[in-house]
Each structure stands twice: as C-alpha cells, then as structure tokens.
Image: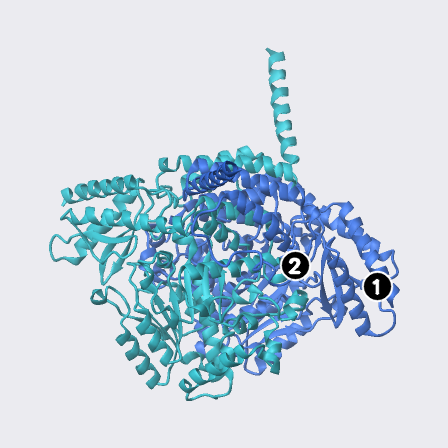
Chain colours: A cyan, B blue
Amino acid sequence: MKLGLIFLISFLFLMNRMDREGCLNLKPMDAEQLRESAHKMVDFIADYYKSIEKFPVLSQVEPGYLRKLLPDSAPYHPEPLQDILNDVATTILPGVTHWQSPNYFAYYPSNSSIAGFLGEMLSAGINIVGFSWVTSPAATELEMIVLDWLAKLLKLPEDFLSKGQGGGVIQGTASEAVLVVLLAARDRVLRRAGKSALEKLVVYASDQTHSCIQKACQIAGIHAENCKALTTDSATNFALSPEVLADAISRDAASGLIPFFLCATVGTTSSTAVDPLAALGRIAKSNAVWFHIDAAYAGSACICPEYRHYIDGVEEADSFNMNAHKWFLTNFDCSVLWVKVCTYLLTSSFRTHIMQPKIFNSLHDVVTATFYVIACVPCQSSVSRKAFKILDRSALIQSLSTSPEFLKNKASEGNLVVDYKDWQIPLGRRFRSLKLWMVLRLYGLENLQRYIRNHIQLAEIFEEFLKQDSRFEVVTPRLFSLVCFRLRPLNCDLNSCNKLNHDLLEAVNATGRIFISHTVLSGRYILRFAVGAPLTEERHINAAWKVLQDEASSLLELL
Amino acid sequence: MKLGLIFLISFLFLMNRMDREGCLNLKPMDAEQLRESAHKMVDFIADYYKSIEKFPVLSQVEPGYLRKLLPDSAPYHPEPLQDILNDVATTILPGVTHWQSPNYFAYYPSNSSIAGFLGEMLSAGINIVGFSWVTSPAATELEMIVLDWLAKLLKLPEDFLSKGQGGGVIQGTASEAVLVVLLAARDRVLRRAGKSALEKLVVYASDQTHSCIQKACQIAGIHAENCKALTTDSATNFALSPEVLADAISRDAASGLIPFFLCATVGTTSSTAVDPLAALGRIAKSNAVWFHIDAAYAGSACICPEYRHYIDGVEEADSFNMNAHKWFLTNFDCSVLWVKVCTYLLTSSFRTHIMQPKIFNSLHDVVTATFYVIACVPCQSSVSRKAFKILDRSALIQSLSTSPEFLKNKASEGNLVVDYKDWQIPLGRRFRSLKLWMVLRLYGLENLQRYIRNHIQLAEIFEEFLKQDSRFEVVTPRLFSLVCFRLRPLNCDLNSCNKLNHDLLEAVNATGRIFISHTVLSGRYILRFAVGAPLTEERHINAAWKVLQDEASSLLELL
C-alpha cells in the first residue's frame, strides 16, 4: 500500500516533470518544433470546421463568464500546447459567436476560406512589417499588382490603377479607408482656405451611411453638426437623392460653409441601398467635393457582369472602397481602397519634390497636371488659383506621410517606390496581399463569380419563402444576398409590431440554431437575413426558414 | 511517331484537365480540404525557417521587379496550390526582407514565435470580427484578462487593470495607440474650452519621440507648430529634460496656448533613450496635461525585475503602450495600450448613461469620482469647475464611440460589457488576444525573461567587440538590446565621418549577410545594431561582427 502510494507520487512527479521538460524545450522559434505544433493546430482548426454546426451560432454565455474560468495571472512556467487546445475547446469556443457557421446570417458575412486562411498562415509565417518598400519589396509590389487585378475584375476606371493615375492600398477596415480619404480631402481644403476653416467644412452622406463616416468626422475634427446625414426613405429605397444633396450643398455654401466631402454607398449596411453614383458624382465634381464610394459589402458582387451596373458612375469618384474580408473569401482584415493619385508622387520624399521643378517626369504628367488646373481650379473661386491642384492627386500622402531619419533609405529618397506607410494611419503593416492573391488564384474569377451568384440565389430562395407566408413581408427590394423582412403588423400599431419583431429576433437567436440581426428603417424594426458564409447551402436556408416559422408561430400564438 | 505525338498531346490535355478538376474542386471552405492544404502550408513555412539563413537578409531586388514576373490580371480558372507555393519560392521570397532571420539587426525586431504563429493560425481559423462583446464574448473577455496578466507582469499600477479603474486594449500599432489617446485628450479639452480652441492645443514630446506623434497630430488637426519636439542632446543621453518641458509649458500657457498632451518614451527609436517618467509625469499632472508613455520596444524588458525601474513613474501616466509584436514573441500586429478609465463606463451606451443619475453604481465609484473632482478640477482655473472630470475617465470612449441601430444589442444597451470598437479607430477587429495568451502560456514568464535577458547579453557581447576595436565607438549608453555605434571620425570633419558610416551601412547591407539600420543623433550619422530576432544566437553576433569588421577594413583601405 505504502509502496503503491510512493510509486504513484513518483509517477505523477515524473509525468509532470516530463511534461514540463517538454514545454521548456519549446524554443522561441525552431523549424521542426514549429512544424510539429502547427500540424497539431491545423488538425484542431480542421476539426473545428468539421463540427462547426454543433455550436450555438450566437454564443450563449453571460457577461464575465471567462474570468471565472481562467487564472488571475500568467503562468511562471510554460504550459503544454495540448492544455491550451483543451482550454480553447472548453473555455474559448463556448464564448465564440461562429461567424463561419453555415447558419450565420447576421450583419454581413466575414468570410474565412481555405485560400484566405492559407494566405493568413503564410503572412504570419513570413511575418514581415512592410511599412516601406525596402522592408520587403515583395509586400508593396504584390499589393499594387493584386489590387490592379481586382480593380480590373471590378472594371474600375484606369485612373484607379497603379500604372495610371491612381492605385490601391489594403486598409484594415472600411472605417480606416474612409478616414484616410477624409483626412486627405480635409487637408486639401485647409491648405487653400487656412486651418481655421476647419469649422466650416461640411461632409455629406445619407442617413443610411455606415457609422464609420461619423466616427471619421469625430477623429478629423469635423464639427458634428457639419457631418450631414441626409434623410432617405422608402420612396428611393433608402438611397440618397441627388436633389436632396444638391439642395444641401447649395444651402450650406450660401451660408458660408465649405462643402468638401461626399460619401456614397453601394449596398448600405441596413438594407443594401445603392446610392445613384453618377448623379451624385456630377454634383460632387461641380462643387469640388471629394467623392468617396463605400462598397464595402456589395462591391464583391460587381465582379459579375450582371451586377456591375451598381457601380456605374464610379468614374466620377475620387476614392472607392470594398471589403474583401466580407464576401470575397479573404480572411479578416482586408479592406481595399483605391484612390486617384499619381503613384510617382506617392513617396515619403514627396515633400521635397514638390518644391522642385522636376515634379514633371514625363509629358504625360505635364498634360495631366495641366488638365487638373484647367478642370478644377475654376470651381475654387474664393481661393488662390495657383497650381495647388497639381498637388491634390497626392492629397492622401500629404496628409499621412512622415519621414523620420531612421526610416530613410535609398529607394524612398530616390522617389522610385511606393511606401504604403504614407497611405494609412498605422506605420507597420502586415503582408495582407498574400491572402488576396491566393484567393484570386486558388479560386479564379470563375469560382468567385459562382460563389457570389450562389449566395444571391440562396437569398432569393429565402425571399420566396417569405413571400409565400402571409404573416411575413419583405420590406425593401432584395438586390444582393441580404433580405430585409418582418412580421406584418397585425394592426396599425407600429410599436407593437416593432416589439413583436424584436421578440422574434431574440427568440430565434436564443435557439442557437441561426443568428440574424436587425435594423430600423423609417422607424420600423426590421430583421436582416444576410446570406454569405462560405459553408452555407440550400439545406441551411431551409432549416433557417423552419426556425423562423416555428418561433414566429410560438410568438403569434401568445398574442 | 504520329501516334506518339497524339499520345503526348492527349496526355498533356488529360493532365491539365485533371489538374484543373483538382483545382475546381477546391471549395470556399471544407474541413478536409482545409486540413490537407494547410498541412502543406505548414511544411512550406517550416522549410522556410529551416533555410532562412540562406537568403540575403535585406532583399536585393530592384524597384518594379515583381511586375515583370507576374501576369497582368487574375486568372479566370483556378490554379493549384503547388503552383502558388512554387511562385512564392521563386518570385515572392527574393523580394522579402527577412525580419525573422537570425542575422536581422535593423530597426527593432518584429518577432514571430511558434506560440505567436499558432495564435495567428487559430485567430485566422476562427475568423470572428470582435467589434462588440456580443459578436464573440470570448474575444473581448480574453483580451481584458490577458492584458491584465501582462499588466501584472509589468507591475503596472492597479489603475490600469480592467478590474480597477482602467483597462487594456490591443491596437494594431503604437501609431494607433498614441492617436486614440491623443483624440481622447483633445476632445476632453475641447468639451470644456470649445471647439474653436483646437488651434491653441499644444502637444509635447522630445525630438527623439517616434514620428507617430507627428502623424497623430496631423490626423487630429493639431497645428503643426503646436506639436513641439523639444530638443534633446547627449548631455541627457537624448532623454527629455523635465526643465525643458516645464519651461515650454509655462511659456506656451502664458502666451494663451493650451498645453494638453505629453508623450514620453521608454526606449526611443533612435537610441533607446529613456525619458524621466516620474519628473515628467508630475509636470504633466500639475498642468492637467494627458501623460502618455510610449514603451513600444523597451516595455517588454520591464517584465524582468532588473529592468522594471525604467518605467518607474508610470503611475503618473494616463496611458501606457507596449508593442508585444516587437520583442515579445507575438506575431505582428499586437500593440497593447492601457488607459486609466472606469470600465463600467466603457460601453457604447455610455452617452445615455452620463445623462442620468445612475452613473454611480457603487460607493467606490462615488469616492473615485469625488477624488477626481477634488484632485483635478483645481488645476483648471480658467474653465468651468463642474463635474466634467468625472467624465474624463471615459474620454477615450467619448471620442471614439458610435452606436448605430444595426449594432445595438442587449448586452451593450444594458451597460454590462466592454465593446472594444469604442476603444479604437476601426470598427472590426481580429481575435488578437489569442496569440498573446498563447505566448504567455506556452513560454511562461520564466522563458520570456530568459528570452529578453539573452538578447541583452548578446548586445553586450557586440558592444564589447566594438570597444575592443579602436576604429569604432559606441555613441550612446547601451540600455537594452540596441547598440548605437559608428566608425570614429578620422579627423574633425563631421560630414566625411557621416559619409563613411553611411557607406559602411550600404556596404554591409549589400552583402545580404546581415541587415542593420541607421539614425542621426545631433547631426551624427549613427549605425544601429538591434538584437532581437528569435533565432539569433551568439554565433550570429560573431559572424555579424566579422562582416562589419571586413567591410570597415575595405572602406578604410580606400581612404
């Protein structure tokens, strides 16, 4: 008995020690240890996808659940990988809302694909920090090339290509994309009108525009009352009316304010409304207003010829944004922004160059610059008509560039390269173009179009279900893969109808079987069913509809 | 012969078709396909680390090299993974500057570790977007817990912990960290002094402070002339002098400006100078100036008791930043920011709550709020002494929160949770705490301390080499793992000495055997040797020294 106990204690001690030794041996980096543990992680993640339908889609934990399960402080001694994987399974996954579940229909999708995941792995493996060209030329150059590829798939105007007058850059999110162009537009005006004009600057968007425009204004110091959310309603399917915009601009200009920025949306967050780009763009242009297009979600669909018309008018835009991390199989984050700027000016040493006559590198440049002066300057009646417009193409860089000594290098100083640090808020940046490159190559346009069309078809199926059940109504036209609907009002009481739909949302999400989200349009509480997860098939649409019908029946019975 | 040709053509056609079929079958997502291809990618990455020393550390390609190697547009048909891996090897890797090479000594390190890589994989695999608590409770809660763990390892004041008065948040970069607190500080002042006071706001930093402070000022609309880079020199080892700061603040305040933000640095980018936090913090506090500490690089060392004193005085700070993605084995990006704010106020619905009497949830809160009013308000002689100071703890959220209908949810509305979207510029955010959690657990404090100490020891060895070669001099005291040095001037001519060292840098980096970078301190061109790559061992230091000696000898012979 005693001997047995001693043996057991010795055994446990030895096991613990072996385990500890195994951990202690994990080096900061080592090719073979990396190989072994990363293979384990691959299996863990593949198993996650294999069992993903077993989890409640919306996490059902209570606030503060995790603190009860984890220690108060980091361990002194290392712990084995297996313990961590076990903890992920038992403590983390219950707190995850499964965006990759085929039963996820909330907000907008955030795709993880095989190609996107492989790209993330490769990017994390190489782990470079590509702020300047020299810190990894491939990172900058692949980004330029791949964003040209994508621009061509979207049939964006030549002006947005890096070979021509413009170029693309990968931002983290649409919020950062709109912020950087807002800053560029702001500073472009302030250079002419003086810094104290800040309080006169006015931004236009619709009341359906994503909240990121409001946040960008807050950050840029645009006064809240000058961030105009122009009212939309069902008459235009919640698209911004050009007349409303023109009126607002005229009124503001007449009262001494300075209209300077317009954000239009292709596929609004609430209901996929599409603003009329061409008409809005003409108004923007004739008022010397920077015209930004947010196509974060719906932009992806425009690689299909039958949906491309939704971005007709993009040629009027100064900047265009699409989130490849939403509905384009590229793991988060990958928000693509294109701007019309001359790439040869986009270097950190631009500031020194604009002071010198050698700004014109070719006849083409001189012609372009002249065009800008002729075309744009007449609109700026109240300010100096010097050749400042030439500089506008590099507005982004002028707002965001810094050139500290410790980052100076031959290629940048020689004005030979793009340094993406000057196109974004952060300095450091990941090698994100790898994943987009892999998505484009591993699937090809063929499969990407098929992917988009399939989701839209699934949304159509869901829409058809709704139309065949008189208790429900589709509340805005379905343009892409989002269906906006609600239980019909039983009487004329808006509030009780809103409450009913709110209760339906809560009931449906509480089942854990699907996850949908909501919005409010003209005071009406609306349910949103957004198809777009890579694993979603027709059977999931059928099952989701069954959940909705069942929960609706239960609720309506209680009335 | 003819038959043979037909056979060959048929074979090629069949192979191509099989290949195509194989590709076409790659689904957007599929557990088994993911498993198979991700295992391939693991081996590719492990092999990369195995052969990493064979690459030139600094990429030797010419600008525009990649466009010559890649097609002009994305493929219509899918391509096989193996083709892409081959292209990575032949076209991408030559354009990579190998930050993970053991012979990388430039800028500061950007660690990739086994644990960090596994964390990135897991995060990309789950691929949630954690902007609000509800979108994956585990993402928000693990971040709060893990940043508490790290705060404790750094012995940060209780005020920075999420349980107490503050909390941590993972930003992408130190640039974003300083920007968000600058915005919080800006808006805190503007709420009192009025929006038109923007032009009077003054930011203080030293001339050694990272350029991100200048960029943050540009973004926030702080006038360039009010972003004061106070001069430092070798008398203080390039640390900011409290007297210089106090003088500047007095002078500016006397002339009607509003001093409002101080950024001190622990481990400057050029030479690891450490600003005297305690003295600076007292000046900041007595002038109601927001005190931010940038310890992006050197913060990691402070988990070792013998280096902790470098952040003595952190208790005076309003915010503190450290980049776990630099020297803390956490793959890019992971910049940790701690702020002193009351977590119960940090919700998107805060704005509705501050208008109501229920702001005080407990006696503790009332006491704290009272303390703030008593301690802070007297400093604000020229402005209203109402209880605005109570609100200052949530300054960050007040600057960055939005609450669109489509993101509203019970947990946020109920004021029960933290929504990190209101602590940062973007809306979406990756599950980055996973990798930091895995780093802390897979290595444990024990190995993390060993890791830091080892690098500092290696830097000491390099420093010793320099001291024993009379041609070189160490130009600033080595505090951490960066050695600043140069070839001594042969005569009194500064310019020729600078040129000599510049030439040495170019020569050394052109060998591809090591990569170092430079800075300029008080007009002197300085070489920087930053130890910190996870694979670096003593033999790499010896070899690097040999390269430097050889190239120096060649250069000096030419004189």
Three-letter amino acid code at the position of disc 1: Leu
Residue B323 point in image, percent of width and height: 59, 55
Q: Residue B342 got which mark?
A: none
Pointer 1: residues within 10 angstroms few (<14), some, or many (20+)?
Answer: some
Q: Does B134 appear above or below B488?
A: above
| Most distant residue in the top direction | A1
| Most distant residue in the front direction | B1
Closer to the camera in the image, A523 or A315: A315
In what element is the residue under mark 1?
Answer: helix
Rendered-image quadrant of the N terminus of chain A: top right
Three-letter amino acid code at the position of disc 2: Val
Q: Does B23 appear above or below A496?
A: above
Q: Residue B61 got which mark?
A: 2
- The residue that disc 1 covers is B555
Q: Chain of mark 2?
A: B
For marks 1 and 2 on the same chain, the one whose residue lies earlier in the sequence = 2
Pointer 2: residues within 10 angstroms few (<14), some, or many (20+)?
Answer: some
Closer to the camera in the image, B438 or B362: B438
